Structures are given as C-alpha cells and as structure tokens.
Image (cartoon, rainbow, N blue to C red):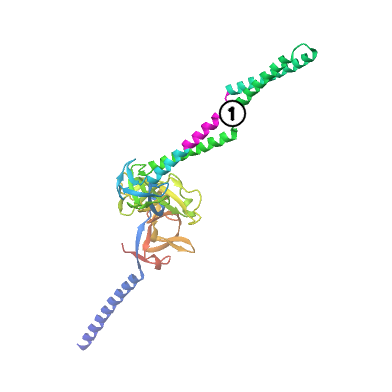
C-alpha cells in the first residue's frame, strides 16, 4: 500500500516537471523575437520642396510729399479710408506759394520789358538803309567837290560853285550825324543774356504755379490710406511723406533666399502661398529674382505677385511659400523613418517570414513623409519602421501592427 502511494507521487511529479519545461521553452522562444511595425514599399507621386518665409507687400505704394514746408490747414482722411483718384487728402496753406508766384510773375514782367527795349535799340532795316544812303550821298558830293576844285584851278568853274557843294556836304553830314545819334547800340550778347534770364523766370513762374496747385494733396490712384504723418495746424516738410496710398488688389509676397536656394528657383515657377491668419492657400508664380545679392544681408530677393481681389491679405502679413523643386510621378517610396544610415550609406530592414533582413538602398528626393528609393528595394516589400534601431541582420521578429 505504502509502495503504491510512493509510485503515485513520483508519477505526479514527473508529469508536473514535464509540463513546466514545455511552458518555459515556449516563453523563452517568444522572448527572443523582437516586436516591430512595418509599412509596404509603394509607388506614388513625390516632390521635393523648399519653404521660404517672407512678407506681404502691397504691389503699389505711393508716398506723397510737399515740395516746400507749408502749414497744414486740414486733413480730410484717416488711415484705412478708401479713396479715389484725385480725392483731396490734405489741404496746405498756400500763402507762401502764392507769394512766391507773385514775385516770379513780377520778375518776368520786368525782364520782358528790358528785353523789348534792348531789341528796339537795334537799328531797323529801314534805318540801316537810310544811313547807307546818306553815306553814299556824302561820298558822291565829296567826289564832285574835288572835281570842282580842279576845275577852279583850270578856270572852268567859279568859287561860288565849290562853296555850294561844300555846303551840301555839311548838310548831309549833319543828317548822318543826327540819324546815328538816334541809335543806342546794344550787343547781341546782352540780348542773349536777357533772353536766358527771361526763360528762367518763366520756369520759376511755372514752378510757383505747381506749388500753389500742390497745396492740395490729392490721391493719384484708387486705393487705401496706409499711413499719415501730419496733423492739422502742424507743419508739412519735404523730408517725410505726408501720406501714403496703397493699392491692395495685388500683393507682392517677397522673400529673402540664400545662394543655395536661389539657384533652384526660376521665374515662372509655381508656388503655394499661405499667409498668417488666412486658412486657404494661394497659388502664384515667381515673377522676379534679384540678379545680385544684397551686400548687407547676403541674400537675394524673390517676388511673387498674388491676386487679392477680396482684400484679405494685408500689407506686412507673414507669408510662407512652398516651392516644388523636384517631382517624380511614379516613384517607389517608403516612409522616411524607415531609413537608417551606416557610414553615411542608407539601408533598411525588411520583414521576411519572421526575420529582419538588412538591405542597402539608394535614395532620391523626399518630402515631409516619404523618401524615394531609386534601387535596392522592390514594390510591396515590408520595411520596418518601428523597432529597427535595435535590430541586426537576421534577428527574429514578429510584426505587431
């Protein structure tokens, strides 16, 4: 009886030890498999892009100045007002401009009078003909008188005839002297100088008229008042724009780019634009790229015009541009996080029947999520995206996703 009990106990212990060994072996095997997550290699369009940060600037900005310091009589608008072309924005005191105009007009009158007098002093054609005729008559009389003197010596004429001719010469000389004395010779240089001064004076009148007209500061375009730098009863100076009008229906998104970025952008490149505070994106094209670097910033300026018909974009808003610089329509791609590097060479692990297999790959362009695989991988192969960092080639794995 006692022997039977011992045998039963031994048999029970044998069964228990056999079950425990099997369970332990199963747990050990499972603990040697590393958990991973995988994603398939697939084909899709992929593009590489660069992102630029800049500002929205009104395409048309017109600062308005005064030509000389004038007092401000009235300000008709305020910042944010919508104005039309030729609307009066600011009225300046025209008193100083009117005084300058009056002085300029007086100068023109005086110079014109002086020029007319100078021109009248120049002998007319009739006067010159008259002088020439008197000179010729005197010469003729002198010739006849000489002949008469010769004839007196020969006894052919009387002394009375010679005296008569001499008297005629005296009369003609007196006429010539009188005609000459009526002329006040004026040089052509004087005339030219007076004409130049008159021309300058007339220009001064035109400028003074412009100053008078400019006492009313008018809007040259349809737009919006963006800034105002004067107050009523204050002084408007030429050094600072009195008011600036902008036109917001077209905005220039402007960006500063470095040498590495500028060589990858060209005029006409399509761009996706976003602006701070505005949800919907805008589409534009690069219009201009500065041909030389700004020596102060060592950057190039890129300008992208944007239609702003709803006036949502305001000047000074922060702008972000996304520019595609490379694009492949049917590319073999994998998630970026699947790629590891060894000595700067990319590789991945793929899951093959519970085993991690290391494969070297050649990569191409990338976006924010995927990277192109140029060679080394096949479509639908399962690349390991999580748990890859602790793997070695040939490790046992199990897929947990």
Question: Element under label 1?
Answer: loop
- For the question of whether residue 23 can be seen, the reply is yes
Q: Nearer the viewer, residue 154 or 240?
A: 154
Whether residue 71 is situated above or below residue 397 in the rendered picture? above
Magenta residues (range): 108-125
Q: Position of residue 268 (x, y in %)?
A: 43, 44
Q: Please tell me whether the stretch drawn in magenta is mainly helix, strand or loop.
A: helix
**Residue drawn at (54%, 36%), measured in percent from left and top?**
194
What is the residue that sits farthest to the left in this orientation?
Answer: 1
Location of the N terminus by quadrant is bottom left
Quadrant housing residue 184: top right
**Residue drawn at (59%, 23%), measured in percent from left and top?**
127
Whether residue 64 is situated above or below residue 150 in the rendered picture? below
Q: Nearer the viewer, residue 44 or 2?
A: 44
Location of the C terminus by quadrant is bottom left
Q: Nearer the viewer, residue 198 or 342?
A: 198
Q: Along the horizontal axis of the image, is 191 left or right of 348?
A: right
Quadrant housing residue 247: top left
Which residue is denoted by mark 1 in the rendering? 183
What is the residue that sits farthest to the bottom in this orientation?
Answer: 2
Q: Position of residue 303 (x, y in %)?
A: 42, 48
Q: Magenta segment: does it hold 343? A: no
Q: Along the horizontal axis of the image, is 257 left or right of 180?
A: left
Whether residue 102 is situated above or below residue 399 in the rendered picture? above
Q: Position of residue 43 (x, y in %)?
A: 38, 51
Q: Nearer the viewer, residue 294 or 140?
A: 140
**Residue drawn at (79%, 12%), measured in percent from left and top?**
155
**Residue drawn at (24%, 81%), measured in percent from left and top?**
12
Q: Position of residue 60 (x, y in %)?
A: 38, 45
- For the question of whether residue 326 can be seen, the reply is no
């Amino acid at each position: 009886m006692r022997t039977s009990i011992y045998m039963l106990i031994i048999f029970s212990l044998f069964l228990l030890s056999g079950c425990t060994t099997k369970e332990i072996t199963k747990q050990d095997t499972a603990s040697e498999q590393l958990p991973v997550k995988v994603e398939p290699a697939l084909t899709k369009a992929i593009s590489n892009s660069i992102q630029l940060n800049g500002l929205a600037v009104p395409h048309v900005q017109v600062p308005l100045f005064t030509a000389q310091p004038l007092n401000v009589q009235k300000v008709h608008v305020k910042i944010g007002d919508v104005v039309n072309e030729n609307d009066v924005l600011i009225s300046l005191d025209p008193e100083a401009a009117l005084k300058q105009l009056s002085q300029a007009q007086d100068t023109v009158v005086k110079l014109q009078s002086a020029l007319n007098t100078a021109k009248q002093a120049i002998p007319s054609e009739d006067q010159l003909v008259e002088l020439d005729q008197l000179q010729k008559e005197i010469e003729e009389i002198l010739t006849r008188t000489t002949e008469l003197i010769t004839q007196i010596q020969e006894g052919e004429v009387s002394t009375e005839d010679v005296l008569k001719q001499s008297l005629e010469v005296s009369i003609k000389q007196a006429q010539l002297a009188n005609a000459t004395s009526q002329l006040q010779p004026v040089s052509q240089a004087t005339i030219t100088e007076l004409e130049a001064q008159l021309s300058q004076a007339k220009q001064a009148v035109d400028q003074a008229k412009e100053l008078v007209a400019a006492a009313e500061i008018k809007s040259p375009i349809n737009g919006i008042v963006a800034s105002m730098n004067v107050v009523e009863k204050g002084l408007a100076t030429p050094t600072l724009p009195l008011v600036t009008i902008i036109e917001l229906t077209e905005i220039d998104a402007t960006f500063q780019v470095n040498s590495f970025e500028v060589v990858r952008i060209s005029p006409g490149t399509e761009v996706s634009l976003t602006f701070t505070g505005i949800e919907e994106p805008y589409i534009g094209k690069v219009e201009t790229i500065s041909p030389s670097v700004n020596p102060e910033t060592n950057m190039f300026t890129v300008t992208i015009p944007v239609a702003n018909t709803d006036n949502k974009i305001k000047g000074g808003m922060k702008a972000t541009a996304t520019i595609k610089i490379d694009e492949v329509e049917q590319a073999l791609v994998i998630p970026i996080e699947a790629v590891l590097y060894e000595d700067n060479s990319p590789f991945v692990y793929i899951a093959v029947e519970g085993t991690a297999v290391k494969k070297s790959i050649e990569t191409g362009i990338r976006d924010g999520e995927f990277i192109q695989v140029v060679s080394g991988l096949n479509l639908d192969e399962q690349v390991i995206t999580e748990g890859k960092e602790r793997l070695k080639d040939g490790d046992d794995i199990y897929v947990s996703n």
